[in-house]
Amino acid sequence: MTENEGHEIDFDLICENFPRHVSRIKMLVRCNASFAAICDDYCLACKNLRWFETGPDDRWKNEIADYRAVISELADELMRVLQTDEIAAGKSSTGGDR
């Protein structure tokens, strides 16, 4: 059993929002439990936002704003990890500093 088994990341949602990074995200999810948790949180927040947005009135206005802020923060965190990982992969594959 792997460390991040049990994570149920919606890769369709990931593909929709990070189309250029799907294969990298799938690889990182398998080997990085912290990254997998960020992806889980991101997918859950996106799904919850969609649910709140389908409401017939403005009673969820505050929750919608909160979820949008959380999604933005999680997306930024995902991109930071992806960029850091790409830099590390580039250094290791070129024999650069470790």
Image: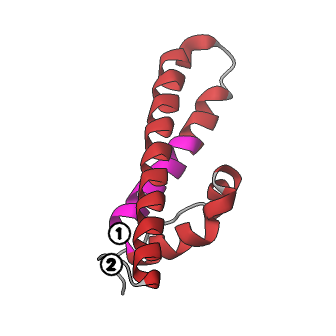
Q: Is residue 81 above or below residue 63?
A: below
- Identify the amino acid type marked 1: Ala
Q: Residue furthest left?
A: 98
Q: x and y percent of residue 81 in the render?
A: 42, 58
Whether residue 66 appears in this view of the structure is yes
Residue that mark 2 sits on: 3
Q: Residues within 10 Å of mark 1 (few under 14, many from 20)?
A: some
Which image quarter is the N terminus in? bottom left
Residue at position x 47%, y 74% in the image: 90
Residue at position x 33%, y 78% in the image: 3
Chief secondary structure of the magenta portion: helix
- Left or right: residue 95 compared with residue 65: left
Q: Residues within 10 Å of mark 2 (few under 14, many from 20)?
A: few
> In the image, which residues are magenta?
32-46
Q: Is residue 6 above or below residue 42?
A: below
Which image quarter is the C terminus in? bottom left
**N-terminal of the two: label 2 or label 1?**
2
How many numbered marks does the figure carry? 2
Q: Quick check: marks 2 and 1 in contact, CB under 8 Å?
A: yes
Was residue 36 drawn as part of the magenta stretch in this picture? Answer: yes
Residue that mark 1 sits on: 33
